[in-house]
Amino acid sequence: MQEILLKKEYIYSGDLILVNYEHELKKQISTYNLVQFDENHNDILIDYNLNLALQKVLKKINANDKIIPVSGYRTYNEQKKIYDDSIIQNGEEFTKKYVAFPNTSEHQTGLAIDLGLKKKKIDFIRPSFPYTGICQQFREAMSYFGFIQRYTESKENITKIASEMWHMRYVGYPHSEIMLENNLCLEEYIDYLRNYEYGKSSLKFKNYEIMYLKMDKEEYKIHIDNNFMVKISGNNVDGIIITTKRMI
């Protein structure tokens, strides 16, 4: 049996952190895990695991020269400048719909990337990524590699962000597939996982089991069977999500 020590500070880091208008980024990420998208886009930094998965999707659908990265990781100051500039150029109503206020932007986590169809002219705020052709092929493949489309029209009342067909969020597998199959946005998924409390029940999906632990103490020790690999992520709200995979 594996014994794993979980600390309250772990709430604020990991692939499943929820960053939105209600839950600000409380812990600035370590840039140690950031990498360049590729040598041709060395100004775009993203999380290492995101990039690894993204390159696999692009290779699978043969889209490396058709889909390009538009925006990845942003510092607080970069996000503030984009927000302030958009207020001046586009107005307050547009900006509140399409640009997150500093510290409520997923781009500050390194776990989000805006993608665009390769064109001569790219709109930085709203790049073209239609529900057709190679872009739709990307959407149809991405959940198997850990991605979700973060903001959709049907969930605008929950996310408070207008539909952004270009904004992809890495949450990791199997969470991406579970969310897709159950039509859950990240806010809903975080709430959904509270039904599977560590020590009482687990969400079973293929050879995975997922549990939620509310961190109402500074530390917890959990015990996981040696036959399982374990991945830990905070939810940036109140607890930790434990994802285990049975070794076959």
Image (cartoon, grey):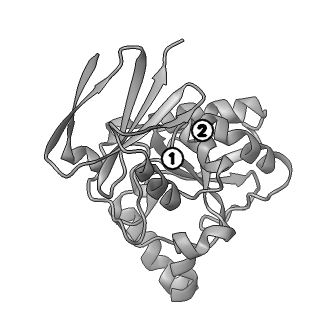
Q: Which residue is drawn at 35% across and 65% down?
A: 23
Residue that lies at the very extreme toward the left in this rendered image: 218
Circle nearer the viewer, 2 or 1: 1
Tally of numbered discs: 2
User: What is the spatial separation of the Cα atoms under label 2 and label 1, in whole angstroms?
Assistant: 9 Å
Seen at 76% across and 57% down, the residue is 120
Q: In this view, does 156 lie to the left or right of 43?
A: right
Q: Residues within 10 Å of mark 1 (few under 14, many from 20)?
A: some
Q: Nearer the viewer, residue 82 or 107?
A: 107
In screen coordinates, is 217 left or right of 74? left
Where's the N terminus, which quadrant? top left
**Kind of residue at badge 1:** Ile
Residue 44 image label: 1
User: Percent from the top left, x then y, of residue 2?
Assistant: 28, 19
Percent across and percent down for residue 183 are 65, 56
Instruction: Name the residue tied to disc 2.
Output: 40
Which residue is found at the position 63% from the left and 41% from the top? 177
Nearest the camera: 128 or 131?
Answer: 131
Q: Position of residue 179 (x, y in %)?
A: 60, 49
Give how far across and how far down residue 187 sits, in percent: 49, 61
Instruction: Give the class, few, some or many, for how many residues have Cα within 10 Å of label 2's Cα (few <14, many ≥20).
Output: few
Residue placed most toward the observer, 183 or 163 = 183
Instruction: Find the residue positioned furthest to the right.
Output: 133
* Residue 142 can be seen in this image: yes
- Outermost residue on the front side: it is 200
Q: Is residue 91 visible?
A: no
Secondary element at tag 1: loop
Residue 220: image quadrant is: top left
Q: What residue type is labelled 2?
A: Asn
